[in-house]
Image (cartoon, rainbow, N blue to C red):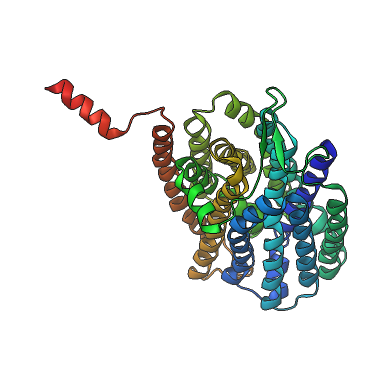
Amino acid sequence: MWLVWTVGVAAYVLSVTNRTSLSSVGVDAAVRFDADASTLSMFAVIQLAVYGAMQIPVGLLLDRFGARPIVTAGMVLMALGQLVMAFASDVGIGILARVLIGAGDAAVFPSVLRLIAVWFPDRQAPVLVQFTGLIGQFGQIISILPLAALLHATSWSIAFGSLAGLGVLFSILTFTIIRNHPPDRDADVAVDTETGAIRVVTSAADLREGFRESWAHPATRLAFWSHFATPFAGTAFVMLWGFPFLTAGEGLSPAVASLVVTSFVIFGILVGPVIGALSSRHPMRRSRMLVLPTIAIQAVAWLSVILWPGPAPIWLLFLLTAALGTGGPASMIAFDHARTFNPSHRLSTATGIVNGGGFLAGLLAILFIGIAMDVQGAGTPATYSLEAFRIAFLTQVPLWALGAGMIIWERKRTRVHIGLDEPRSRRRDRWGRLGR
């Protein structure tokens, strides 16, 4: 049981490394591909677009075939993508590489969530989901520090070729060790060891029906918008724009900038258990107590950096990464919504819908920032400036506003749906009768 989860989590760490492998080498990529800011954004945007688009198909495939073949296929695709990236010399080939990486990455995290649902009792699932998300973030540290150091010590081809080799190794490892379900079962099931209840995890066979039924539940939409609004600022910062902003904008040395970006991961790991514990203790107040405050904290932190006269002091930049670090753990709450309110036959489909939300917002944020840089005439490393970055990062504000508004709306509808609140019409009728 624990070996299966450990291998799955290790695969997720490598998946995150692949996902963020341009994070600290964005300037190198701009030089190698002779790319302006919008073009550089497209590497990450297309990768995230593929990731998001693959979530529902991956969910349906997981419901039908189980985690083992899907996670193995994901590792193979990422290995192939990094091999292509290792020898890419023009933008088109580089984008093809990111497409393959995005498609492979899309298969890994939902597969690990599937393993948790099948191999572990329900009472352990929320904690394991949080730990999976937290441990996976070490992949960002690998992409920020060792990968960048390897690239600068050797070459682009050797650095990305090494990631391809790791992908091949993990393809073999996941196929050899991971199993769809425990050996004493002949189907994917999750067992509650306290009650002995067994639920079979099977497929919603029709794509349209599975998607429609999952999306029809307001809790799935609440989860989608929760995952949309909480992690995207950190995604944009770590995947592409944080390192150039800190070096070319704020004037930090590459070593100090790496430390600031790495602190994003450390803060997320530290705050994750706290958010997970509060989420478990207050399941009916998670949106108001955790999700919405997380959005507000990130927005206030970014606005403080943007409005600071001149380069921000180092302590404020660390506060920024601490605020952004809350986004990943808070986004895990969305999967609790999906798991709690969707039946087992729609488990992975609902998870795919929810997971797509965060990456949709992430790709929009990365794209908007890149476009804003180009519009200001600051689209290349030689023309990056602090003022241009400040204006560009303001494009995140509409995404926070949209996400927060939809969370408030869908939270109310979810509470009405499960009987915790009365519909507004009933309240108006009641007040009307009392006023007569």
Q: Farthest left residue?
A: 436
| Front-lying residue, 212 or 225 | 212
Total number of numbered labels?
0
Q: Residue at x 72, y 45 (%)?
A: 112
| Front-lying residue, 426 or 400 | 426
Please identify the quarter of the rendering in which residue 114 is found. Answer: top right
Please identify the quarter of the rendering in which residue 186 is found. Answer: top right
Q: Residue 408: where, in percent of width, then height?
A: 41, 39
User: Vertical placement of 171 versus 128: above or below?
Assistant: below
User: Vertical placement of 242 versus 420: above or below?
Assistant: below
Q: Residue at x 75, y 41 (%)?
A: 135
Q: Is residue 276 visible?
A: yes
| Front-lying residue, 86 or 34 | 86
Q: Is residue 20 visible?
A: no
Q: Residue at x 54, y 25 (%)?
A: 282
Q: Farthest front residue?
A: 186
Q: Is residue 345 left or right of 211 when viewed as pictured?
A: right
Assign the C terminus to one quadrant of the image.
top left
User: Vertical placement of 238 versus 323: above or below?
Assistant: below
Q: Residue at x 72, y 60 (%)?
A: 104
Q: Residue 200: where, in percent of width, then height?
A: 67, 40
| Front-lying residue, 404 or 424 | 424
Q: Residue 304: where, in percent of width, then height?
A: 51, 43
Assign the N terminus to one quadrant of the image.
top right
Q: Residue 360: where, in percent of width, then height?
A: 54, 56
